[in-house]
Image (cartoon, coloured by chain):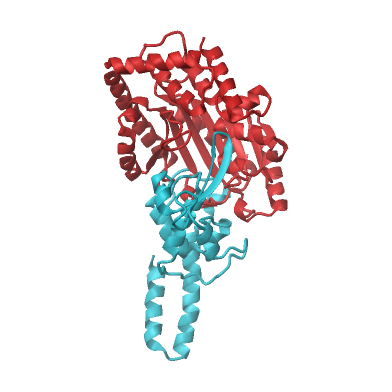
Amino acid sequence: MSEPVILSSRVRLARNLRSYPFPCRMNETQRAEVVETVRKAVATLPYELMFVNMEDISELDTIAMVERHLISPEFASSGKGRALAVTDDESISIMINEEDHLRIQVIKPGLSLYEAYEIADTIDTALQRELDFAFDKQLGYLTECPTNLGTGMRASVMMHLCAMGESHAVSRIASNLAKLGFVIRGTYGEGSEASSALYQLSNQVTLGISEKAALENLMNISGQLVQSELATRSRLMESMEYQDKISRSMGILLTARLISHAEAVRLLSNVRLGITEGLIEDISLDTIDKLMLSIQPASLMRAQGEKLSPSERDKARAKLIRDTLR
Amino acid sequence: MKCQKCKVKNATTQVKRVVNGEYEEYMLCADCAHEMGFDNIFDSSMPDMFGGLIKSLFGTALPARSQASRCPVCGSTAGDISNTGKVGCAECYRVFFSELMPYIKRIHGNTTHCGKSPEGPAIAEKSVAEDARVSEVESLKEELDKAVQEQNFEYAAQLRDRIKELEGK
């Protein structure tokens, strides 16, 4: 279930095989060998993971995976010698030969960092029995980019900070968070583009801080941000102008015939706020959160089963939104 | 190459991302990158940014103490690593330990891992720091012998102090 402020939590572990160079230095044969070695190890896991060779799937499907935050843009840029192991519900996935040999990723709804880590940790421990991971007593797990050294763990929470975003509070706290070793960044493009008020907060420091301590810090800061966002929301909702803005957003979404991705995301963000503040009833947060994902270009075209021009997409998007919200 | 936004200044920043379903890759100058919010060096979607940072740091005469110019396992040079911001293989961390350490410290503020480690024999392995120190001591001792033979006693004394310092750790 999505929560009023926190949509989802994610934990990612970077691991490399000791006996192969990192992906930036691997040749085609080595890439294939790593994929095969990892595939065998993944088959021993107590989870049912589907194995996908990235070369075998279409560009549209690949980009739709990026839109769902299942894979990274970097991983999508080339399918050569890369594979993805993923569960049916996409909550657990392993990217093979991205920047590191393995990127184990677990996504859970709401604020559930510990739960996500526990699963990622179980998978990592099980894989460690099958694979020899590059590890050093001082530097921890060795990774292609030194930014991931140590635990190799990047944990993040996706937050809807619409009220704080409105008052530019997010950019003000960003520099303070950086000093604490955390980064907050907008999703769906930067700055003037589609402003969904969705932010991702994640840890940056991976060396010299244990997984547990990093998760605790992240939980702590997330909790504070949630409190601050909720307080700002109540203040904002006292204004009739803002209530009007939310109702109008709903009106447009229910009636528009053509709608761009940027506009849809902005209006859906307003409606999401209206739902959590009790102004809009009968629509669940999950419906909005799913809609936010499915109105993206590649996801939309995939659902329609054909390639669409931007204006055809705007039409299909408007229809999908009307049908879902009615 | 000129910045693709202002078309005036030289491009120093490569940006790769997926926006509205399209994969994009473009080059920006430092100012435009900053303006568009692409100057966060830790952004994992922009690995080349970090490369740029490492490169700029490498330029400022840092001690390059390791003897090897090339990693024997993957063939990376210190230059390759500084240009791309990517380390070639696990062995590189051992070979280029002294070059990499200042950046690692800069990125994380720490230099010693704390947290999970693989179960089993991997734990017993020596750390790269120890290894790097041992190999440095060995090469310093060789140099010391040579200095003594050449009766370069001032240099020999310096070497002896350095060896003492390393072995004392």
In the displayed structure image, the side of residue B124 where residue A269 appears, left or right = left
Q: Is residue A147 visible?
A: yes
Q: Image quarter for residue A14?
A: top right
Q: Is residue A139 visible?
A: no
Q: Position of residue B154 (x, y in %)?
A: 37, 86
Q: How many marks?
A: 0
Please state if A157 lies on the left or on the right of B125 as rendered. left
Decide which of B10, B78 is in the foreground and name it: B10
Q: Residue furthest bottom?
A: B151
Front-lying residue, A271 or A154: A271
Give the camera-side residue of A212 and A218. Answer: A218
Rendered location of residue A172, percent (x, y) = 30, 38
Quarter-of-image position of residue A202:
top left
Q: Which chain is the one coloured red?
A: A
- Residue B94 appears at what percent x and percent y? 52, 61
Name which residue lies at 53% across and 25% down: A293
Q: Nearer the viewer, residue A54 or A154?
A: A54
Chain B image colour: cyan
In this rendering, is residue B54 above or below A222? below
Along the horizontal axis of the image, is A311 left or right of A235? right
Left or right, A231 with reference to A281: left
Q: Position of residue B40 (x, y in %)?
A: 41, 47
